[in-house]
Structures are given as C-alpha cells and as structure tokens.
Image (cartoon, coloured by chain):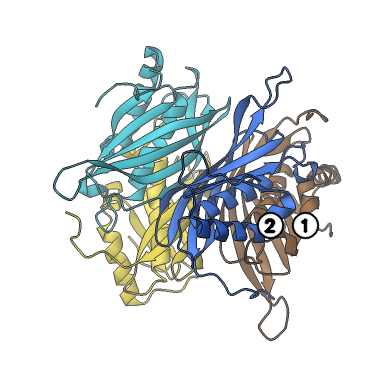
Chain colours: A brown, B blue, C cyan, D yellow
Amino acid sequence: MASAAAPGWPALDPATENRVRDSIGRQTLLTTLGVEIAGLSAGRVMLDLPYRADLCQQHGYVHAGALTALADSACGYAAATLMPDDRDVLTVEFKVNLLTPARGDRFRATGEVVRAGRTLTVCSAEVVTWADDGDGNPGVSLVRVALMQATMMAVTPPRPGSRG
Amino acid sequence: MASAAAPGWPALDPATENRVRDSIGRQTLLTTLGVEIAGLSAGRVMLDLPYRADLCQQHGYVHAGALTALADSACGYAAATLMPDDRDVLTVEFKVNLLTPARGDRFRATGEVVRAGRTLTVCSAEVVTWADDGDGNPGVSLVRVALMQATMMAVTPPRPGSRG
Amino acid sequence: MASAAAPGWPALDPATENRVRDSIGRQTLLTTLGVEIAGLSAGRVMLDLPYRADLCQQHGYVHAGALTALADSACGYAAATLMPDDRDVLTVEFKVNLLTPARGDRFRATGEVVRAGRTLTVCSAEVVTWADDGDGNPGVSLVRVALMQATMMAVTPPRPGSRG
Amino acid sequence: MASAAAPGWPALDPATENRVRDSIGRQTLLTTLGVEIAGLSAGRVMLDLPYRADLCQQHGYVHAGALTALADSACGYAAATLMPDDRDVLTVEFKVNLLTPARGDRFRATGEVVRAGRTLTVCSAEVVTWADDGDGNPGVSLVRVALMQATMMAVTPPRPGSRG
C-alpha cells in the first residue's frame, strides 16, 4: 500500500492526503474487495485490485462491477484531491467501456481530473492489468481493460452518523 | 430467492431458466455481495441487493460500484434470456446515473431489453429502494436510486477452465 | 407545429411555456436542422425532425449528430419546464445508444425528467420514427431509433449579448 | 482543408485515404454544418467546425448536437481507417461530457482508436477550441470543450441506393 505520488503529478499536501486517505478508508466496499492505494497526487489517484476468485463473472474474469467500483473511487478521489477541505465528493454519473476480458493478477485504475469546476468535476479513468508474454515471463506488457468517463460533484458532507 | 417471472413479462422456458440460473450462480462477485434473484422473465431480470455495512462508500450509503454490479448483471442476464442456448453474454459498456444517495435496506435492479440484435443487445436498468414514510412505516414509497443504459454482446462462450 | 401538451402530462403555465418557446426559438441549430415543437408539458418535451437529405451520414440515414441535437434539446427543455423562471439549463453530459439505422420521414424525440434536483436534473429521451408496413401503408408501426440518458444543470443565465 | 496526417500518427495508404474521404464526403450533415477535414491518420482523425451563428444553442454557443456530430464522425472515421476495405462503420453508442460553453471561432475534434476489435472498436475524442488571451491576441491557449467515449461497429455496407 505505497503512498508515493503518481509519477509526474504534484504530491498532495499532508492535510489533503490525510483527508483523502481517511475517506478511502471509510469506503467499506473497497475493503471488502481488497482494494489498495497505489498512488495519490493532486488530480490523480491510482487504486489497485488484486485478483480474487470471489470477484468474478461467469467465466472467471473479474466482474465489471468490481472494476467499476475501482475506477469510480479512483475518479472520485482524484476529484476530491482538488476540492477544499470542507467539501466532499459524490458520483453524479459514469460511463464504462470494457475493452477486453479482465484476466490478470492485479488491476490498476488511474483516475484523473479532466476539468475541475466549482460544483462539477469531469474525470476519466483507465483500468489496466499486466500480461505475461506467453513464455512465462509475468507482467511484461500492459493491457487496457476498461475506460471510464465520469462526472463528480462537490457537496457539503452529511453529518457523521446521519445514516440510521 | 423467489423464482417467479417478473409481473407482466413472459416466463422463461425451463432450459433457458436453468442456463441463466447456472450462469448467475457462477458470478462469484454476486455471491460475495449477497445478491439474490428476484425475478426472471424473457427480456427482464430482477436482482436484489440487501443492504450490508461492508458494501458502502464513505457516508455509509451503498457504493456505486455495488449498485453497478447489480444493474450490470440484471441487464446482462435480461439480454441472455433472449439469446440461443449456445451463446453467452459479455458487457460492452454501460452508463450509470446515480439519482440519490443509496440509503435503504434492499436495492432492486430491474434490467430490461430495449432492443435485441443478433450481436448487440441494448438494455436499460433501474435500481430502486423502498423508503419509510418518516412515521416508522417501512417501505411505503419507491425511490429510484440509479439508472443504467447498457450494451451487451452475444459471444461464443470460452471453454470451461480456460482461465489458469 | 402543434402546441398541445404531451398526452397524459400536465400542461405548462403560460409564463413557462413562453419562456421555453423563446429559448427553443433562440437555438439556431434547431432552425438550421428544421426541428419542430411537437409537445410541451411539465417535465416532458417532444421535438420533431423531418427527414432531409442534407442531414445524413454516409448511407443516407439521418446522422447520429442530428438525432443527438434533437434528443439533447428535448431533454434540456424537459428539465427547463421544471426550473424557476430565473434559471436556465445547460447540458452536463449525455449518452446515446443508436438502436437501428435512422430511416424514416420524421423523427420524434421525447425527453422526460427522471429526477429533478435543485442543481442537476437527470433526463431520458427516446427517438422514434414510423415505419410503413411494406404494403405502402405509411407509418403504421413505431420504431425506436435512439435512446439518450442525460444530465442537465440549472444555471443563472448569462447576460444577453455576452458573446462577442 | 489540409490533408496531412495527424502529427506523430502513421499516414494512411492512398486507398484507405480515398475510401475514408469518399465516405466523409457522403455525410451530408457534415457539409451542412461546414465541417472540414483537418487530419487523417491510421487510427486518428481530426475534423474542424468553424463557428457559425446558425449552429448555436440559446446563449449563442455552439450546440452540443453540432459538437457531437463532429466528434462522432471523428471517432467513426478513426475506427474506419483501421478496417478492411470491404467494411463500413456504424456508431453503436457514445457518451459526451460538455466541459465548458463552446465559445470560439473554430472547434477541432480529434478522434482516436482506443481499442480496435474485429467487430467493435472503442474510440475517444476531444473537442478543443482556441481562446485569446484577453489582450486581443487570438488563439493562444487551447481549451477543451467536450470529451467523447464511443463504440463503433464494423458492418458490411448496405448496397448503394438502398434508401428509397
């Protein structure tokens, strides 16, 4: 669970990093799925999903819903890194293209801010995996698995405990 | 885990129902999330997700990724009910609007075929929940939580066990 | 260019109807494409596009861009009918599935509000045409041509003439 | 109406370039809107839309439908450049985010192939314009106006003249 900024992107100030890590930690679905933080930068967040046999569709590939959870959170937190401390992020909508069956040992969603507005932020995310070369050398080529285009909204956070 | 056809929609013949139930049963993510079959008809599939605290985003509402898994499978199997027995379904893409925070005890995705083609099938899904009336009477009004528009593709199924 | 409310939907009060008609009239692209108002109700707007040979793609069917202009405006004005008089509508995003080649003499987009919020309104639209029966009887069956799912935003209108 | 390949992308062989140019020339909507070819490469197509007052929405900005026509054709022909000569391209679906009001003298859609399959090709497009610097120096900074994520399908072309 590395903490490095995404290469080439500005690092987060410590307060924002804490806020974002706290919020990610409260997304219980990510814990259930086994998601790991792979990189946090200003405007760019990378989340990893290691393959598990209990996250699949009918052919044993990772289910589009699990990849979407990964990409949605990567986009949402990429947007959140650029928001003031008193704002929180909600997903308005997203669109996902599945490019190839999600076969691999690890999946990485990289969510990036395309345009940050005061209320709405448009993000995109790629989900990739690493394929071996057919000769048993693992992870030599990068495979794009899914592509997301998403709209996020800055909201005033609900008070803690407001869900019954 | 009721088996009735969706009201007003044609029932499935037993062979198709078995094929679809078998395939749903192999989607291990659905088991992990606790998804239940609520109705199978020709061109329409209803899947339920009971609320669980380990499926949430940072405010304690059900995560968009879990709702998407539900709606994607409802759309995919709605498409599958209209395909010949030797075909299987893959998700090409979907788009989801989150209409309101997913607060509720149970979420139901109803996936329907909008247009079935030989290769591509367009589907839509609504995810709803039931809200109480503020006086402690549970589930009196229906709340639309999410809306999906999706494209599914008929494929020749991969051979069993083809994933290493 | 009928002015009737869409069947089964509440009529607009005259002030809102004037506001919406004025705004539609200022959408110069709609005039260029030959779009006609087919129905205005609270939360539902129907716009028609008669076939023209100069609005087509490479096979002589109406271009997806023209159908999208029609559906986008139908969704946007459906949202606008439910907004206060001092607000205007902008398109945040939309998703369109093309269901079948757009062959026909007239295309009708019906845009409806799915959920109206203070800032964001989610809409859907269907574009249909009428097919003859193969025996020369025109328009006997309805064909769905395209499906849109869209997000609209209420904004404070820019001052008149603010574009240089 | 330059004919150069997009910078850094492989040029088209003459037969493919002729096929694509012929097909673009048959898209009568593009002629109606005044669209110009700005670059054709293998897997990447750039189309320009000069501003015209008759292509606007209610505030005098270019209508989302016109931008969508531009981006859809850029994506479609980007996909077509990678298809065999006996195949033609149809749009399955697209999703568009409008990033900022479309204010500018010229809009350029760059459509690129993200993944080319035998039947389906996933593409993305950006639409940009050029903003002056507020001191009357035109076009010094690039502004992203819209973002498209699209699915295209390879089909056997219909016979010429098949539309009545």
Secondary structure at numbered mark 2: strand
Taking B111 as reference, is D16 above or below it?
below
Q: Residue at x 37, y 59 (%)?
A: D90
* Residue B158 picture quarter: bottom right
Q: Picture coordinates of residue B85 (x, y %)?
A: 48, 65
Q: Picture coordinates of residue B56 (x, y %)?
A: 75, 42
Q: Residue at x 32, y 50 (%)?
A: C63
The residue at the far top in this view is C14
Q: Picture coordinates of residue C133 (x, y %)?
A: 20, 47
Query: Three-letter amino acid code at disc 1?
Result: Gly
Q: Is residue B70 left or right of residue A160?
A: left
* Residue D72 in view (yes/no): yes
> What is the crowding at mark 2: few (fewer than 14 residues within 10 Å), some, or many (at least 20)?
many
Query: Do tag 1 and tag 2 residues touch (Cβ < 8 Å)?
Result: yes
From the viewer's side, name the closer residue of D43 and B141: B141
Q: Is residue B52 left or right of residue C144?
A: right
Q: Quickly name the residue at label 1.
A: A39
> What is the crowding at mark 1: few (fewer than 14 residues within 10 Å), some, or many (at least 20)?
many
Secondary structure at numbered mark 1: strand
Q: Could you confirm whether marks 1 and 2 are on the same chain?
A: yes
Residue D13 is marked as none
Identify the subunit bearing mark 1. A
Identify the subunit bearing mark 2. A
From the viewer's side, name the closer residue of A57 and C109: A57
Q: Quickly name the residue at label 2.
A: A110
Taking D121 as reference, is C140 above or below it?
above
The residue at the far left in this view is C136
Taking B58 as reference, is B83 above or below it?
below
From the viewer's side, name the closer residue of B67 and A59: A59
Q: Residue at x 32, y 26 (%)?
A: C39
The residue at the far bottom in this view is A135
Query: Three-letter amino acid code at disc 2?
Result: Thr
